[in-house]
Image (cartoon, rainbow, N blue to C red):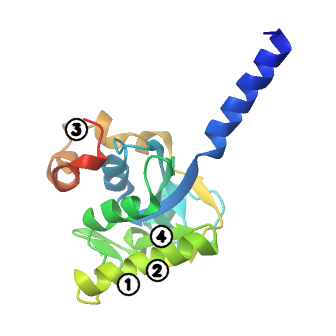
């Protein structure tokens, strides 16, 4: 095989890998929790903590946490739909937080901790709304307050927020808040997790 043909095939294969990746943006309270729950899910290649849903460009954590931006703490979840469906991601999402509490998760209070899903297109929106209607009727007594909003922009959180749980497992917040959420998801939905 010629070098040029080999390079073309290699380029096409790498583009195919990129084309198979999709992104969904989910916020369910503190992004450290969301990130930890989704990091080891089969089909998820990357989870990035950041901010979305608000009005200010490139906000800092301090601005968002003071409710100055209308952004929520969210995670960008990059996944391969051939390995994990959007419905599975939503199942994990709704299991791992309380979508019935407005602007809070446990002791984390404020609009930046709201339950939110940001969609890219009408197909995603339909899947999300259908899923929410189903679990809202069957599991949540029609009390879900999750905001469903069109995605416009995502801003990375500062570096110290990334991979927070894995790098800080001895911290009390990680032990008492994040770890139980991760354990719950892994126990109830173990078939979706890397062993």
- The local secondary structure at tag 3 comes to loop
- Image vertical order of residue 108 relative to residue 100, above or below: above
The alpha-carbon separation of the residues under discs 1 and 4 comes to: 14 Å
Determine which residue is flagged by label 2: 129
Distance from label 3 to label 2 (Cα)? 35 Å
Above or below, 194 against 124 in this view is above
Q: CA distance from mark 1 to mark 3?
A: 35 Å
Name the front one of labels 3 and 4. Answer: 4
Occupied quadrant, residue 52: bottom right
Which mark is drawn over residue 171? none
| Tag 2 and tag 1, C-beta contact below 8 Å | yes
Q: Is residue 191 above or below residue 170?
A: below
**Which mark, residue 169?**
3
The nearer-to-camera label among 1 and 3 is 1
Q: Label 4: few (<14), some or many (≥20) within 10 Å?
A: many
Q: CA distance from mark 3 to mark 4?
A: 27 Å
Would you say the residues marked 1 and 3 are in contact, meaning their CB atoms lie under 8 Å apart? no
Q: Which residue is mark 1?
A: 133
Mark nearest the camera among 2 and 4 is 2
Instruction: Tell me the residue that label 4 is attached to.
Output: 117
The first of marks 1 and 3 along the sequence is 1
């Amino acid at each position: 095989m010629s070098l040029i043909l080999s390079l073309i095939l290699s380029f096409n294969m790498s583009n195919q890998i990129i084309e198979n990746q999709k992104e969904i943006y989910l916020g369910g309270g503190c992004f450290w929790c969301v990130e930890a729950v989704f990091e080891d899910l089969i089909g998820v290649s990357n989870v990035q903590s950041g901010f979305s849903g608000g009005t200010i460009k490139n906000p800092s954590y301090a601005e968002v946490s003071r409710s100055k931006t209308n952004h929520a703490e969210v995670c960008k979840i990059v996944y391969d739909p051939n390995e994990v469906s959007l419905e599975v991601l939503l199942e994990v999402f709704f299991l791992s937080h309380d979508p019935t509490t407005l602007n809070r998760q446990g002791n984390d209070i404020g609009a930046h901790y709201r339950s939110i899903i940001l969609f890219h297109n009408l197909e995603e929106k339909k899947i999300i709304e259908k899923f929410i209607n189903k679990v809202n009727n069957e599991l949540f007594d029609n009390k879900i307050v999750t905001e469903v909003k069109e995605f416009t922009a995502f801003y990375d959180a500062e570096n110290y927020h990334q991979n927070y749980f894995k790098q800080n497992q001895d911290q009390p917040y990680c032990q008492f808040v994040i770890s139980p959420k991760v354990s719950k998801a892994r126990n109830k939905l173990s078939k979706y997790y890397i062993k």
